[in-house]
Amino acid sequence: AQTVTQSQPEMSVQEAETVTLSCTYDTSENNYYLFWYKQPPSRQMILVIRQEAYKQQNATENRFSVNFQKAAKSFSLKISDSQLGDTAMYFCAFMKPMTQGGSEKLVFGKGTKLTVNP
Amino acid sequence: GAVVSQHPSWVICKSGTSVKIECRSLDFQATTMFWYRQFPKQSLMLMATSNEGSKATYEQGVEKDKFLINHASLTLSTLTVTSAHPEDSSFYICSASGRVAGVDEQFFGPGTRLTVL
């Protein structure tokens, strides 16, 4: 079974600074997806970034980028130029690819609460 | 982008009554939907996987007779909490799976806050 570990329950960063959230996972699969989701106080889950395991290039979405180390099973999220609106819970998640039998479930980490201070 | 709605967003009910929560994929067809439960300051806990036209698959420890799931169409799944009790009070989130630009992804509803008195 797959597991996802986020070792930082809480983190804080000053506005405009850079912060990195850690995530490690365990799987015997070779092909899979990794995601970072943001859950602000509204509790709506928002996809921040995704990475396909077969792609060596790290995914980037504006101020958000990942450091994907497949051999080390590590998938950290870097937030540059932090903004007050980045304050939220961040969840790392793992998913196997869809099969003919249907979709696979997401396996979530416990989350990291990020606070951006003015 | 893909949009998933949930209704109601907030519900209060008396102990012993049943509550139905709807999850709809508004602009795509979802063969699979997922139901999660989230306690305050915790991660999402998968309750069940719902496939259109077939019985839901429940996670270990989730009472299927307590949490009835119906996925009658490609755009609608419902979760019914039967004979609700205060311990069922929680935040319930659904998601619908789809493939966007060749990548598998789950799209989340805004959640339903259930309070059982």
Image (cartoon, coloured by chain):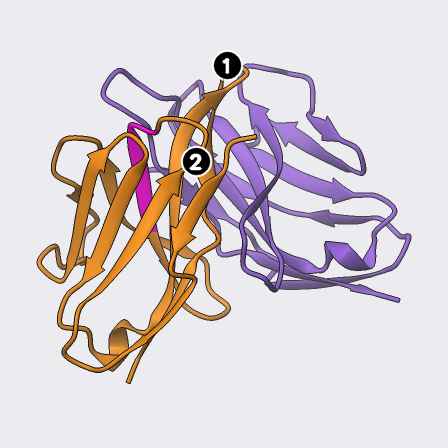
Chain colours: A purple, B orange
Tell me if residue A76 is in the magenta stretch. no
Tag 2: amino acid? Leu
* Quarter of the rendering containing residue A24: top right
Please rate how many residues cluster around mark 2, counting C-alpha atoms within 10 Å: few if below 14, some from 14 to 19, many from 20: few
The chain letter under disc 2 is B
Q: Which residue is mark 1?
A: B102
Magenta-colored segment: predominant secondary structure: strand
Q: Which residue is at a point 50% across and 37% down the rendered structure image? A: B3
Percent coordinates x, y for residue B52 in the rendering: 21, 31
- Residue at (46%, 71%) from the top-left corner? B40
Say what secondary structure mark 2 lies in: loop
The numbered mark, 1 or 2, whose residue comes first in the sequence reads: 2
In terms of image quadrants, where is residue B24? top left
Identity of the residue drawn at 64% across and 47% down = A22
Expressed as whole percent of the image width and height from the top left, the position of residue A108 reads 45, 47
Number of numbered discs: 2
Residue that label 2 marks:
B26
Q: Quadrant of the N terminus of chain A?
A: top left
x and y, in percent, of residue B95 in the image = 40, 42
Few, some or many residues within 10 Å of mark 1 (<14, 14–19, 20+): few
Label 1 sits on a secondary structure element that is loop
Q: Which residues are magenta?
A: B30-35
Question: Is residue B25 at all visible to an observer of this figure?
Answer: yes
Residue B47 is left or right of residue A48, and the answer is left
Horizontal side of residue A114 vs A101, given as left or right: right
